[in-house]
Structures are given as C-alpha cells and as structure tokens.
Amino acid sequence: MNAVVNTSTTIIPDERWSNIKPEVVDHYELALTHMWAKTGSVGANVFRDRGKDRFRTYMYGPIPNQYNDELGHYEIRGLELNGTLSPAESLEVFAGTTWLKVEARGTNGLKQENMPYTPKFQAQAGCSWKFMDNFKLYVDMQHIRDFYQGTTFRTAGFDLATLTPVDKLHDITLCNAKLSYGFDERTPRLKDSEVYFAVNNIFDQDYEYAKGYPMPGVTFFVGLNLKFH
C-alpha cells in the first residue's frame, strides 16, 4: 500500500486510499468422496462463494475517484462431480464436471446472471498410462461452454459490466497429449527425471478468451526435466 500511495498519479493520494476496504469472498464447501483401494474413487462437491466490495482494475494513468467505490456483491453456486478409475496398475482414467450458477448485483441494483470468465459448464477427462517401464503417456480433454469475455469493461463505467450475446465466447474443446521417458542416473544423482514430447490443441480448434485475440492452434513442445537428489 505504501508503494501505491507514494507512486499514485492522483491528487492527494493519501485521501484516495485511506478508506478502501479489501474485497471479501466467503467460501462455503461440502465434499463427499468414496474410494476403492487401488481401483478408483468418486466424489461430489457443492460450494458457494459470496463476494462483496469488489473493485475495478484501471490501467490507463491517473485513477478516477469512482474507481475507489465498491461494486455491489455477487454469489456463485456450484456443483462438481469427479471420479477416477484404475483398471490396471499402469493405467488411470479420470473425469470431472462443474456446473456454476451466478447472481450479481451492482450498486445500481440491476441483477445479472453472468460474470466474465465464469463458465456455466465445464468438463475435463483424461488418462495416464505407463508402459515399457520408462514411458508414460498422458492424454487430456477440456470442454468449456456458456462463458463470456470481460476485458473491454475495465473502463466502460463504474458498475458491474452488462454482458450481452456479443460478449459470449464460442464453446471450447481442447485435447492435449504428452509422451515422456523417465530415467535415473547415479552420477550426477538424477532421479525421476524425464525427456518429453507434447502436443497442445491436437485438433487445431479455433478459440478465443477475448474476441479478436485468437489462441494458438496445434502447438508442439520438446523438453527436459532434471531432478537432482
């Protein structure tokens, strides 16, 4: 806070920051998990986040006084289901889904059912397979739908952004894979090290997290992880 006050470009910065309250998020969660030894597990989580005194980000020079005003409150309720399965000692499969329901109200009292980058549904699944002693193959998939961008609202006003169909992003489904070879060496005391080859966005899907800024297509990686003990 001292750095913010001393470097602020506002007039009389001490008066602008002295009464600011921190954003508060109350998180409540109830989880239930059942496990079968060496076989798998299933789980369910319900949760609720209640936030208040939210502040907007401003990155364009002197901060307007209104950006020191809180922006109402919001509530996010969610349900998560997850599970793992190990049909063999060298193979594990996992999957999970999450549903979110949002309610937000700004200082203007208007109710909204969407917030930026808060998807109403997302799912993940994947597997890991160890074979030929030293090789491991990882494959995963992620699906996201019903979510909105929000970067353009940083300076659009002094209340919660009103999201419209124009701000809704296309559904995203991404698949990735990684093949690694693990090795140990007594000299120079390497253990659990690996060399790997990975591919992101295998099916070259077009997607964006902000409209007009496309994310990369098929991307290849080659790497080396060294762990010394």
Image (cartoon, rainbow, N blue to C red):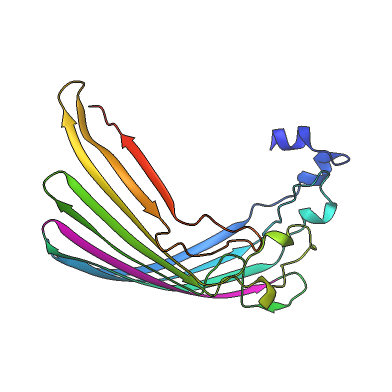
Magenta stretch contains residue 138:
no
Q: Is residue 22 left or right of residue 130?
A: right
Considering only vertical position in the picture, is 161 above or below 185? below
**Left or right of 137 in this view: 147:** right
Q: Position of residue 13 (x, y in %)?
A: 82, 40
**Is 8 situated above or below 81?**
above
Q: Quadrant of residue 44?
A: bottom left
Residue at position x 62%, y 73% from top?
Answer: 168
Relative image position of residue 192 (x, y in whole percent): 21, 37
The residue shown at (68%, 52%) is: 21
On the image, the x and y values in percent for residue 91 come to: 16, 59
Q: Is residue 120 left or right of residue 19?
A: left
The C terminus appears in which quarter of the rendering? top left
In this image, 150 relative to 102: left or right?
right
| Magenta stretch encompasses residue 95 | yes
> Which quarter of the figure is the N terminus placed in?
top right
At horizontal 48% and vertical 65% (from top left) the residue drawn is 205
Q: Nearer the viewer, residue 163 or 129?
A: 129
Residue at horizontal 75%, vertical 69%?
107
- The stretch of residues the image draws in magenta is 89-105
Image vertical order of residue 81 relative to residue 69, above or below:
below
Q: Is residue 59 visible?
A: yes
Foreground residue among 109 and 115: 115
